[in-house]
Amino acid sequence: MDDDDQVTRSVQMSSSLHFANLADYRAAGNGEPVLSGQTSNHLDNGYGLQGNPTLHQLQDSISKLENGRYSLLFPSGSTALSALSALFKSGDHWLVPDSVYAPVRRYAEYLDEHFGVKCDYYNPASLDTLADLINDKTKLIHIETPSSATFDLTDVEAVVELAKAKGVPTSADNTWASGVLYKPLDHGVDISILSLTKYIGGYSDVFMGSLTTGNEDLFKLFSYQHRVLGYTVSPFSAMLLNRGLESLEVRLAAHGANVECLVQGIEGNNKVTRIYKITPGKGNGFSGINGLFSIELDRKYSDAELEKAFAKLATFKIGESWGGTRSLVLPFQPEELSQRFNAPKNTIIRFHSGLENVDLQAADIQGFLKALQP
């Protein structure tokens, strides 16, 4: 490697960006791309916090994946979701689906407690009353489709139509689809958020989130907050995410194929009253499935009963953060989901099918179900 290559590599990975002259440094501080690989305007590109070309490359890749124009990177998916607060001031109001990812509910409670930003929850399965919840203080309608644990679907275009009629922007957590299986911005949503930690990372070795929009005014609002709060990610982490993007579609297809096989082996089991999974098409806009599915058991099982059944698992590990190559399993008791309009009455078991041999996964699930006492 010659000296020029070493300098280029240092620039790409370092927090200290090196400029040939003062004029270039001043231009970068005004958001003008001057280093090779810098592409984002409206940002201070003179410092590695936002100006590192490796981060720009990933931001541009995420924008292309989501069919957006502007993207920002955050230390985690939860952090990216919390960036929605840029839209609020004290006394404002927003709407969130009742089946939303639990950290969003906690964040909504935090905003109410500390800043007086009110939140109401709507039923994503029945949008008839959504219009009644919108008031003159409403600044955002958030969408999560499918929802966590039970994969409830939302009629995104109906929400967008209502929101636009009221002049309210919309956001969507698009982590399940990971920018491949569904593209919210194509359906009129203003802001799409991804937990890049999941499928785009793909190997459970990096945390990151992203926010993407096609609206320049919204981007300026979010990028200002992004800079003020000092959000950033490591260029080494961004490098790993760029790696993950190269195999994203292939991995998603493999995860989805495994789920189809596993579900076929479970259908008809007397311990399973319902299987929760997405079926592509049928007007829902999804082009495929990922590695997630859940089963509702025939009754509520205590943690002590579940512990004995989980002890039979070898391939599936108990854990929360899905999207990697390893198979995971997690129980949800009815009381954990009791705040939903359509709350389940029995224990829910969520599986994430990894990329291990699918026969081993199937044997694991069969052993788990067999270990549950009637």
Image (cartoon, grey):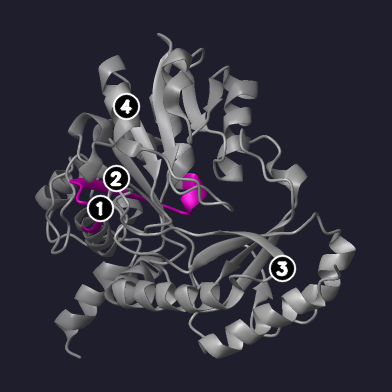
Assign the C terminus to one quadrant of the image.
Answer: bottom right
Image: 187 above or below 297: above
The magenta-colored residue range is: 65-79
Location of mark 1 (residue): 66
Q: Are marks 2 and 4 in contact (CB under 8 Å)?
A: no
The answer to whether residue 223 is seen in the rendering is no
Q: Are marks 1 and 2 in contact (CB under 8 Å)?
A: yes
Q: Position of residue 67 (x, y in %)?
A: 19, 51
CA distance for labels 1 and 2: 8 Å
Q: Which marked residue is nearer to the observer: mark 2 or mark 4?
A: 2
Q: Amino acid at mark 2?
A: Pro
Q: Which residue is located at x 52 percent, y 89 percent?
A: 357
Q: Amino acid at mark 3?
A: Asn
Local secondary structure at mark 1? helix
Q: Amino acid at mark 4?
A: Pro
Location of mark 2 (residue): 184
Mark 4 or 1 closer to N-term?
Answer: 1
